[in-house]
Amino acid sequence: MNHGALVVAILRPPNPCSAACGTEASVRSILTSRYLAVFAPAGMDDFFAEVGKPVAYSATVPAPQGPPDMERFMGICQKHGVVFAGPPPA
């Protein structure tokens, strides 16, 4: 579907999706799913390393300890050129 400059793709396993460098993208899952993102050229790994918190291997992800520090998060996003374009259309 095309909503003006916005393209909406309905994907089902094992369909891939790709976008050119610099393309704004949003993802919305309507079912239980897994999402694998590959970034090229490299560099987003630096963003995830800075914004994330390492944890020991566990079968479950530990619950967050309090609300996220959005000011810190948005500062890291700005530093790495991550821009929030908004949610995909319903």
Image: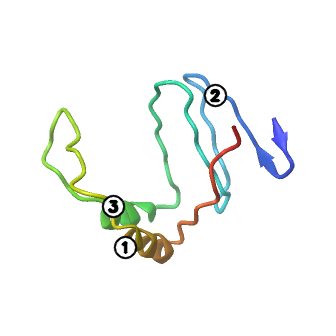
What is the x, y in percent for residue 19? 66, 49
- Which residue is situated farthest in the left direction here? 56
Vertical comparison of 19 with 72: above or below: above
- Tell me how far mark 3 sits from mark 2, CA to CA: 31 Å
Say few, some or many: other residues with alpha carbon within 10 Å of mark 1 (under 14 / 14 to 19 / 20 or more). few
Inspect the image, locate mark 2, and give the three-letter code of the amino acid beneath it.
Leu
**Upstream in sequence: badge 3 or badge 2:** 2
Q: Amino acid at mark 3?
A: Pro
Among the 4 quarters of the image, the one containing residue 29: top right
Residue under label 2:
11
Query: Would you say 18 lies left or right of 60 here?
Result: right
Name the residue carrying label 1: 72
Tag 1's secondary structure? Answer: helix
* Rendered residue at 44%/31% (across/down): 34
Residue 68, numbered label:
3
Q: Quadrant of residue 11?
A: top right
Could you say where residue 27 lies in the image, as x and y percent from the top left?
58, 42
Q: Total label count? A: 3
Report how far apart the C-alphas of labels 2 and 1 lie in the structure: 33 Å
